[in-house]
Each structure stands twice: as C-alpha cells, then as structure tokens.
Amino acid sequence: KLNGTKPCDAPGGRCVEIELSAIYDHGGLNQTMNDALQRMGMTNVAFDGLAEESRMILLTDPKTLLPYQMSMTKGVEGILKISGESRVFRRTDEIGLDFAYRKF
C-alpha cells in the first residue's frame, strides 16, 4: 500500500512510504511447526492456534528507489502445549533501519 510522501534525506527531500503486510495461513503454520517439533523428537510439545503477522514500512526515494528508512514488525501468538499443560504466548519483534549514502 502506498501511504503517500514524507520528508527524508533523499536529494529531492521527499520519499514515498510503502507498507507491506502479510498474514500467514493459521492451519499451515500450526502444521509446519508441529511437524518440525516431531522431527526434533519433541513429542511432548505442540502448538495450537498460532497466528503470525508481519509488517514492513519502507521510506524510499521515488526516483532511484534507494531506501532511506525501513521498519519491520513481526507478531506471533498462540498456545504452547507442553506435557498436557497449555500456555498462551505472544511475542513481537521490531527492527528499525536508517540508511545513509555518501555523496561523491
């Protein structure tokens, strides 16, 4: 999604903000994670109700497409079952990057 323009350090002083979002298939994510646990021999551990969403916002020069800022957020939540005991968990990871370019 194109969110418009914002000030940035690009030669023209303005960048476009682009937002990308992804929501993963819940059933497929549960199956993939549980298959991996089984292959690792962790037969007493399982996931249920997993949900994962990722979002990236990129601030880029519209003429050169050089990035000037990028932020990424990934959220995961679900139920972890260990030996019959269930625990709800939620985790959010955030990363922010600023880019600078030398002028020759």
Image: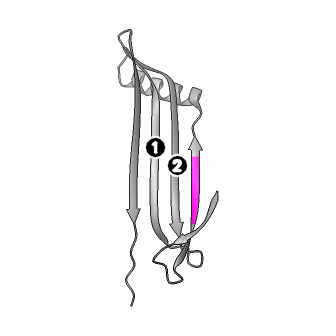
Between residue 17 and residue 52, name the one nearer to us. Answer: 17
Q: Specify start and end residues of the magenta stretch as a single range.
A: 17-21
Residue denoted by label 2 = 55
Q: Earlier in the sequence, mark 1 or mark 2?
A: 2
Which amino acid type is shown beneath numbered disc 2?
Arg
x, y percentage for residue 6? 54, 69
Numbered circle sitting on residue 92:
none
Between residue 13 and residue 39, name the one nearer to us. Answer: 13
Name the image quarter holding the N terminus. Answer: bottom right
Q: Are marks 1 and 2 in contact (CB under 8 Å)?
A: yes
**Number of numbered discs:** 2
Colouring mode (rainbow / by chain / secondary structure / one colour): one colour
x, y percentage for residue 4? 62, 65
Please say whether residue 22 is one of the residues in the magenta stretch: no
Write the residue at 52% across / 62% down.
58
Query: What element does badge 1 sit on?
Result: strand
Which amino acid type is shown beneath numbered disc 1?
Lys
Residue denoted by label 1 = 74
